[in-house]
Image: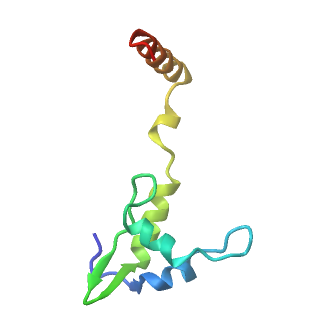
Amino acid sequence: MISIHDERLIRLADVPKLIPSNRDGKKIHISTVFRWCRPGLRGIRLECVKIGGASFTSHEAVERFVAKLSTPIEASTDNPDEATARSAAAEAKLEEIGI
């Protein structure tokens, strides 16, 4: 949660200036930043607050968002044998119900 007293607020329109350009040298579009707030990316949302009619986030919230996206997904740390077993079980269940 953003603390408006303790964090450095930034307008959502200014977030693309914080993010490095992609491989093509293009900055992210402002609509991307709004999508990060709602519905989010891979289940992770950029924290945003609305003050008056303007939407804000914070430098710290952007850092938290990027850090969460950069953490490996738990499933990728699974034992490969367990993943194979779950996959085989799912396939068997699908065959059982005729799919």
Task: From the top left corner, tell me how far across and down residue 11 is, in percent.
Answer: 41, 86
Query: Residue 19 is drawn in which quadrant?
Result: bottom right
Q: Which residue lies furthest to the right in this view?
A: 24
Q: Residue furthest front?
A: 98
Q: Is residue 96 above or below residue 21?
A: above
Between 77 and 85, the one nearer to me in the picture: 85
Query: Residue 90 is drawn in which quadrant?
Result: top left
Q: Is residue 7 above or below residue 97?
A: below
> What coloring was used for the rendering?
rainbow
Between 83 and 41, the one nearer to me in the picture: 41
Between 45 and 5, the one nearer to me in the picture: 45
Q: Which residue lies furthest to the bottom in this view?
A: 52
Q: Left or right: 74 with respect to 52? A: right
Residue at x 25%, y 90% (from the top left corner): 52
Task: From the top left corner, tell me how far across and down residue 9 is, in percent.
Answer: 37, 85
Query: Residue 6 is drawn in which quadrant?
Result: bottom left
Residue at x 52%, y 25% (from the top left corner): 79
Give the quarter of the figure containing the N terminus: bottom left
Q: Left or right: 38 with respect to 29? A: left
Q: How many marks?
A: 0
Residue at x 48%, y 60% (from the top left corner): 67
Task: From the top left corner, tell me how far across and down residue 82 is, in percent.
Answer: 48, 20
Task: From the top left corner, tell me how far across and down residue 50 is, in percent.
Answer: 28, 81
Residue at x 46%, y 11% (from the top left corner): 95
